Amino acid sequence: MNTIVRKQMSIHPDVMDLLNNQIAMEMKASASYLAMASWCDQRELLNSKAFFYKQAEEEREHAMKIFEFINDNGGAAISPNVNGVNNDFESLLSIFELGLEQEISVTQSIYKIFKAARKNDDFITEVFLQWFINEQSEEEDAFRSIIDIFNLMEGMPLKMIDERIPTE
Amino acid sequence: MKNTIETTSDSYHIEYLRFCKYVLHTPTKAIQLSFPQMLELRRKINAKTTYKSLNAIVNNENFVLLFVADKQHLLFLEIPQLIKLKEEIAVFFETPDFILA
Ligand SMILES: [Fe+2]
Ligand SMILES: [Fe+2]
């Protein structure tokens, strides 16, 4: 980055582009969890519904964290298009499996930005992203633990499985 | 249109005046830009010059109209000009100090 641009912004422009993509990904994740929450809500799966409403909120918070970070550092945060949200699911288990896949792709995406920040000597973003890396490890763990419950309680009524789902 | 200064330059280039004051010289006018306006121009140009987007332009009207400087100016760009402006912006944002010096 040259001095002229550096005086205006403290993060690297290429890294900023990736962070803007990440905002879109978090907002998409939020919308996706909202669809999952609705599916559960309609079927009276109370704990699962609470879990996914909470997830939807958290993903929006992640998006906002990045949004403010970009603007605070002199960049331009972009409010993303969110489309192609799936509202059609097969089962509660498949929803949690989709959730885990979504979390893994978010983790991979964060790693990609982290690497780009490193490559471009953008240490501010690198440090900022450390929180997200810890967060993703917790998120993946939460989904894996829930999928384990399904495996342990195989054959039990869905309602009983739902009662074992943590609500946050 | 506001902030339009005639220029004899026949190409696109970006001039640095001072902190948060830049000038985009086009063949017909010079447009003053703030840094947020530069970032927005960069975003638009990058979006218009993806492989997919360039293909769509070539297969349709073969030019793009681009609002700049918070919609105070409208640029008419054919593909070569679009590419030139993209390069100019890339140089502005990416060129390290040791090359500019
Ligand atoms: Fe997230
Ligand atoms: Fe998440």
Image (cartoon, coloured by chain):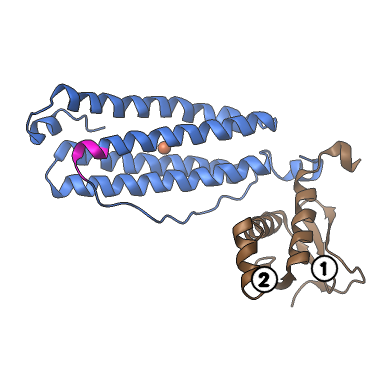
Chain colours: A blue, B brown
Q: Is residue A98 left or right of residue A45?
A: right
What residue is rendered at 63% in x and 40% in y?
A15
Q: Quadrant of residue A115?
A: top right
Q: Residues within 10 Å of mark 2 (few under 14, many from 20)?
A: some
Chain letter behind tag 1: B
Point out the tag, 2 or 1, that comes first from the N-terminus. 1
Identify which amino acid the numbered label 2 is placed on. Val
Q: Nearer the viewer, residue A71 or A40?
A: A40
Q: Position of residue A150 (x, y in %)?
A: 18, 28
Which quarter shows the C terminus of chain A? top left
Label annotation for residue B64: 2
Identify which amino acid the numbered label 1 is placed on. Thr
Q: Position of residue A40 (x, y in %)?
A: 18, 44
User: Was residue A92 drawn as part of the magenta stretch in this picture?
Assistant: yes
Q: Is residue B68 left or right of residue B13?
A: left
C-alpha separation, residue under disc 2 versus residue under disc 1: 15 Å
User: Was residue A74 drawn as part of the magenta stretch in this picture?
Assistant: no
Mark 2 touches mark 1? (CB < 8 Å): no
* Total marks in image: 2
Query: The magenta stretch spans which residues?
Result: A90-95
For marks 2 and 1, give the one nearer the viewer: 2
**Which residue is label 1 attached to?**
B26
Mark 2: which secondary structure? Answer: strand
